[in-house]
Amino acid sequence: MKLQIKIVLVEPLYQGNVGSVARVMKNFGFYELVLVNPCKLKGEARAMSSHAREILENAKIINTFNEAINDVSLVVGTTGMTSSKDDEHIRTPAYTPSELKNKLEGKNGTVAILFGREDNGFTNDELKSCDMIIHIPANDEYSVMNISHSVAVILYELSSIQSGEKSLAEPFDMKLLYEHLKELLEQIEYPAHKKDKTLLMFRRVFGRAQLTNREVQTLRGVLRIIQRRMK
Amino acid sequence: MKLQIKIVLVEPLYQGNVGSVARVMKNFGFYELVLVNPCKLKGEARAMSSHAREILENAKIINTFNEAINDVSLVVGTTGMTSSKDDEHIRTPAYTPSELKNKLEGKNGTVAILFGREDNGFTNDELKSCDMIIHIPANDEYSVMNISHSVAVILYELSSIQSGEKSLAEPFDMKLLYEHLKELLEQIEYPAHKKDKTLLMFRRVFGRAQLTNREVQTLRGVLRIIQRRMK
């Protein structure tokens, strides 16, 4: 088994950027490109892709954000903005590309690395669907990078990664875990106004912990016992 | 004293690339751009520079390669091609960006990082003028990166560097050292056909060793004693 990394561009606006992303993917040995509702891809995209035209031509084009993430074990969102407030789980904690590399070392499974729109990044709902957020440390005076530069830096880091034996939990099992946690919060009558935030925190914590299937089963076992004892 | 890093583009062909380089320089906090005999810089260069337009406008435009390197302590050439032959000192040994970072950690002085033409890279004479060669490890199937992606990866690595107290030798003293070595090779009647290659090897060795002024003086002292004993 190998770590399978796909690059997802969410509603890219400029075809030149899409072509540039394809080129740098091939430079670092990554081939799977997914485009969510992209701009028109014509001559400029092809020109910028240079000798990586096959990556552009084989890109999977889909209509919705959810289609991009429903079959992956780990959804990684990249953002140019981080939050300094510790209780805003949407953008925190943000990891660096080298921390992401360390976390993926020795693992296998499917990982999607998502890049938002050139002008507006991700919506909050999209960010909430990410298991993990990464941020490239940049100059405070001007931290917004060109999308293909962000891809270049992240794939440069990940290109030396070694896959391994530790399988990431299946997306389906992770989904069941989060539903289970939600059910539990309802059963314990957790304050409604805090519920979403706390569920997001669970996603961030378990996302960056990169659970194995065994761990997911054990956690759900614990949840079941708690539920039984509360009856 | 601080480490002062300037980015030198040698005869860039596409103005969009020059603008992109300016943008990513500002993203990582680098401000000194030097352009050797560049293409015309108009609207597309400004558009791609985005909020780093001042770096583009303040770029130093010069006519010859030598003007770019005669006032710097360490000349670093970046190349997409490396040589596998150990005796070709032109492109070997090639260091990675993270090895360059480790070498510069704790130093101060002026460093120029040079990027060649988008189509033909550097001439052999230009490469011979470099103290050190770096190469971004990339996919054998397609290793030629867009110039702004190369700048992005290298500056990403260097952005976290800490300057220090160890001053790099002055360019003038390094020049005297190389002239001294050349003089010595002539005095010992070193085989003419090997002389240039060996002088280039000295440049590569002392370049990556990053000599201090004190070390240059000591080396030249040793050379002087050798010369005296040979008379």
Image (spheres, coloured by chain):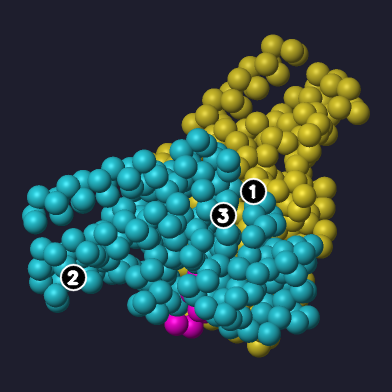
Chain colours: A cyan, B yellow
Circle 1: element type: loop
Q: Is residue A100 left or right of residue A158?
A: left
Q: Identify whether B74 is placed above or below A164.
A: below
Cα–Cα gap, marks 1 and 3: 20 Å
Cα–Cα gap, marks 2 and 3: 32 Å
Residue type, numbered disc 1: Ile
Determine if the magenta segment contains residue B140: no
Tell which tag, 1 or 3, sits nearer the viewer. Answer: 3
Task: Tell me where residue A42 sits by quadrant.
Answer: bottom right
- Residue nearest the viewer, comparing B183 with B50: B50
Q: Is residue B8 left or right of residue A76?
A: right
Tell which tag, 2 or 3, sits nearer the viewer. Answer: 2
Cα–Cα gap, marks 1 and 2: 46 Å
Instruction: Write down the chain letter for disc 3.
Output: A
Q: Is residue A24 left or right of residue A47?
A: left
Magenta region: which residues?
A115-120
Q: Which mark is residue A195?
A: 2
Instruction: Write down the chain letter for disc 1.
Output: B
Q: Identify whether B156 is placed above or below B46.
A: above
Residue type, numbered disc 3: Ile
- Residue nearest the viewer, comparing A224 with A141: A224
Determine crowd level at label 1: few under 14, some 14-19, many 20+ residues with C-alpha closer than 10 A.
Answer: many
Q: Which residue is mark 3?
A: A5
- Residue nearest the viewer, comparing B213 with A24: A24
Q: Which mark is residue B136?
A: 1
Report x, y in % for residue B95: 63, 40
Q: Measuring 44% from the left and 65% from the top, which residue is drawn there? A: A78
Instruction: Look at the image and tell me whether residue B76 can be seen.
Output: yes
Q: Identify whether A170 is placed above or below B209.
A: below
Pointers 2 and 3 in contact (C-beta within 8 Å): no
Report x, y in % for residue B41: 69, 81
Please identify the quadrant where the C terminus of chain B is shown: top right
